[in-house]
Each structure stands twice: as structure tokens, then as C-alpha cells.
Image: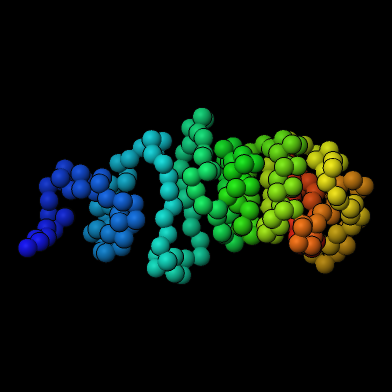
Amino acid sequence: MTSTINLFRLPYVAMIEVLKNMELGELIEMSRISEKSFNYVHRFFSRKNIGQFKLIVYLSYQFSIGITLASISWKTPANFLFDETLYQPFHLDLLCIRQASWVTVSVATKLFMNCKRVFINGNKWSPRDITEFIKKWIVQPKIDRIFIDCKIKSLTKVLAGIPSEPVRSHVRNEIQIDLTEATCYKIRGFNGQEAIVFFLAHQFVLSVDSEM
């Protein structure tokens, strides 16, 4: 005959040991049972030093119903490395990452290419990084718009060897704006999807919508 115990009636040290041996999904499901269970799980995680643990976002189907926005913040050390090979690609309508020095072109092309709109701030990609990203987009043109901090301002260098057409003007707020030569180009994905690429302040921009 199997007996059960009330986890939250155990001594605190014993309860913490039980929580340590639970899977992440089990902890999240348990935190949804009641306010009391949520407080215990929250207290358990608040004792952890985020610099020593891998951060994983877990959203079950039931938990994600009605969720329209999730914001996650953590402090990364200067030598923080993110192994993109351990995770499945993201499928988000909007992805914003600030202080993104850890977001390499490999991370972006392996995990973010199925997102619709992406904003990456705080990184400094090289011309080669931008070129590699554009080539990946041409193969898999699913991103509608992406802003990436970068070090360069010359599109001709970035687009060397990539089929492109200069764009002389574009529409913003229903007003046609003439562009300086070599500041905006049109590229095309393998499926026929077109996009324009240009620089805006310190960022590289790719957009399938010419009405910026």
C-alpha cells in the first residue's frame, strides 16, 4: 500500500532536499497548485545563484494559454558562453534581447530564424557576421524584421557576392523618402521573399516590409 505525505509539512531542510531532486517541469507544475506552493518554489529558486546554473524557459501547453508576453532577466558574467546546440529553435512573434554580447551569429542563425521580429542590442557583429546572417536568411527567409547592433556602415562590403538590387527610395509613414546611393539594397530569399537591408544609426536592419 502506497502512502503519501504533505510535502509542505516536512521540516524545511527535508523539503528543500525533495525540491532539489524534482525536474524543472515538475517544480513549475507544483508552483501552480496554490499560492502556498508557489511561494515555496519561488523561495527555493531565489536561493540559487543564477551565475552557477543553466537558465531554461519551460512553457507547457496549458501554462502558455493566454500568455502574450514573457520577460526574463538575469546577469551574465563577462565570460558567459551560450551553447546553442543544446536548445530547440525559438518560434516567437517578437524577441528582444538587451546586453546581448553573448549572442553570436551562430546563436542567431540556429535559434532565432523562425521568429518574426527580432531586436538584438548590445552586441557588435563584424561585417563577416552580418554577411553570414544574410546568407542564412536567404536560405530560410522567415524573419520579417531584425535589428542587430554592428560595427560597420558599408553595405557594399557586407553584400559582396550576394545578389542584391539598390533601392533608391522607401516609404515611411506614407511618405516616400529618397535614399543616398549605396545605403539600401533589396535581397531575395530562395522562396521569392524580398527584403530590404540598410543601416539605421548603429544597427543593421533587415525588413520584408518596405514601409519602415
For the rendered model, the colour scheme is: rainbow
Q: Name the residue: 80% across, 40% down.
A: 158
Image vertical order of residue 151 relative to residue 61, above or below:
above
Residue 31's spot in the image, x, y percent? 29, 58
Q: Position of residue 114 (x, y in %)?
A: 61, 57
Residue drawn 75% across the image and 42% down it: 131
Report the side of 172 relative to 139 (left or right): right
Horizontal side, residue 156 vs residue 121: left or right: right
**In this figure, what is the number of numbered marks?**
0
Please name whichever residue, 144 or 2, is drawn nearer the observer in this view of the structure: 2
Q: Residue at x 51, y 65 (%)?
A: 68
Is 205 on the left or on the right of 163, as rendered? left
For the N terminus, which image quadrant? bottom left
> Above or below — where is 138 with respect to 157?
below
On-image quarter of the C terminus: bottom right
Q: Is residue 179 visible?
A: no
Residue at (42%, 59%) from the top-left corner? Answer: 59
Q: Position of residue 168 (x, y in %)?
A: 92, 55
Q: Residue furthest left?
A: 1
- The percent coordinates of residue 181 (x first, y second) are 92, 47
Tell me, yes or no, if residue 119 can be seen here: yes
- Of 182 and 160, the residue lying toward us: 160
